[in-house]
Amino acid sequence: MKTTLHLLFTILILSGILFSQEAYQPLFKIYENGLYGYINSTGKIIIPPKYKGAGEFSEGLAPVRENGYYGYIDMEGKYVIDPKFDYGNNFSNGFAIIYVNSKSNYIDRFGRSLLAIEYLYLSPFENDKAMICTFSGKYGIINSEGKVIVDTNYKEISKLRNGFFVAQDYNNEYTMIDSIGNIIVHPGRYNKIYELYNGFAKVLWYEENIEGTNKWSMGFINSMGELVYSKENAPEFNISDFVSVDSIFIVSEHICEKNDNSQWDSRKLFEGLMNINSELLCIDSSGSSFHFIGDNIYILDSAGMYSRTDNQGNKVGPKTFCDEMGKKSIYSVSGNQIFGIIDTSQNFVIEPFFDLKCYLSISEGCFIFGKYLRDVNGNILLNSNREYVSKWGIGSYDGTVIREALFDEADWGGFINGLLLVKDNDKPAYIDKKGNRIWIQSNNSYGTPESLNVDFRIQTKYSDNFWGWRPIISKPIDEQFDDFLEESGHTEESITLLLNNEKTLFRYKFDGITMYIINNSDSNIAVPTVDGEFYLVFQAIDKDGIWKQIESYPSSFCGNSYVNTYISAKRYYKYSVPKYYGEIRTKIRAVLSVKGRKNTEVKIYSNEINGSVNPAQFWRELPIFTPTSFLESKMID
């Protein structure tokens, strides 16, 4: 009887799963008048735009922001998890990462927290494992039950690769750990361990010799941590980072020599293939080079063509063009300055007809191509920045042009669930695979300033140079401005910041107010900058009464970008600055870094004004150069 009931219960569950899968219809995010909603694949509005922030639907739920806080709605727009989080990510593998006061935790579909304590950083679950990071910057690994399987002792931990983690501790020593937390290679044995591929991981170690220099050695270990290949004290020798599916790897040796200008040049002596048993299988002397693409070894010739090699380095199969991962069978190729699409045998699937390399969406059977706009004489048109003007279209692999190149932009991710996000006449729109436009943003979103209601810190770029956000006015202080200062109560003979509620248009599209930088002294004031952009941000008072940043300072990857500039004596600068909208009513002020005596950094604060922000602005940073979807077009550049 128990067996029958169990079988019946199983059938009912499976029936429910099959039914839910058949009934599932993907929803797509839209943005109208500063609010988010969702449509189905035919363009029908399923959830009207009413949210200030929103993510994508995943596993039947979507994070949305209402009244400043995030909750989760189902596909009918009903709250399944009430809005109470500063920020929430999409669900993945049964869990979503949420944040409160910059602290993160996992919740399940019922809103229950997985972890007893919060962390600075959490990764999504993959293969039942996720990375955690403490507020002291130490990494570890947990499973989906919230159990710590790799303790938080490490500076870095790789993703789980073929059942193993590679971790680096704060002594810069490496270890290899299996998926249940057992240490396979103890720290201190190797100076570097690479991730495991095809059963082997590259390792490096060195020994300090009598002269005080390091003699590097290298090799491969297997999944049990055993050293199965080694090359000791060979600093000019090198092996590839990976081993192929056939347990073959690339070896090479170089020699460094001084040239006629007394500069060191590196010259390759040889390159070849070796197996894990230390047997040299071949040496290439043709001037070509070996490369890993995916799990296999290819040889690249002087014409830029790849050929798969056998164990002896012989070319097998046709030449091909390959992408970075080697996982696509169709590639873009140049021909008479235009592009087409070829297969791996170099036969054209699509004859060359477009100007810009396409973005492939093989699973959807379509591709995106670009063409330059030309005048009647065939000359490419230029915009006001002297850049080529291009448009984007959609084609299918049978050679049919689904839509001519008329779109301003197209989502490089291609078609997702049958729809492609494009920008049509500067408006976001969704296009189906037949080329039909099923939704376009209404005109109501244009013509009036938008309210800057965000859940992250924007990165500021205030400047008086060519780069950055230039002032509306930059003038010497005169009698008229002296009168303005006196009325404002700011008459100090020094550098001053002044916020004023005079309305402006911030970054050409958002509600803004006015900020003045005033140097009423007789000296130029040095200020640190990034490419001429000031260290100037807004601060606000949080719920605990503490002043905190709500914007990010400018930054750059280039060390040469960090230089001083000067704010001229007896001069003022008028800027348009953001007027934020949010749930928390607070006080706002600006703060500017200047150089004081002995090159010390001094903070200059503005007056305080009333304002409002959202809770995530106190802590949430966006990665530098992260593209923002043109659905919202909120990129503050």
Image: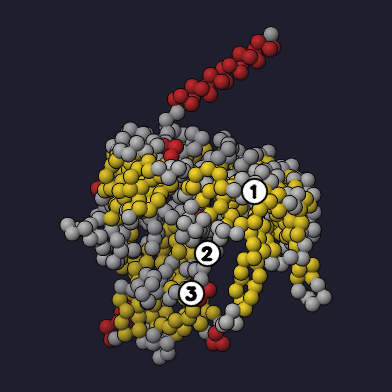
When asked about the image quadrant of residue 517, the answer is bottom left
- Colouring style: secondary structure
Q: Using residue 437 as the reference point, say whether residue 635 is left or right of it.
A: right
Q: Residues within 10 Å of mark 3 (few under 14, many from 20)?
A: some
Q: Farthest residue toward the left?
A: 376
Where is residue 15 drawn, in percent x and y?
Answer: 53, 19
For residue 517, say whether it is visible: yes
Classed neighbour count for the residue bearing mark 1: other residues with Cα under 10 Å, few (<14), some (14–19), many (≥20): some
Q: Which residue is mark 2?
A: 548
Q: Nearer the viewer, residue 357 or 120?
A: 357
Asked which secondary structure carries label 2, the reply is: strand
Q: Residue beneath label 3, please?
A: 561
Image location (x, y in percent) of residue 321: 47, 49
Q: Separation of disc 2 and disc 3 at Cα?
A: 26 Å
Q: Quadrant of residue 202?
A: bottom right
- In the rendered image, the quadrant that contains the C terminus is bottom left
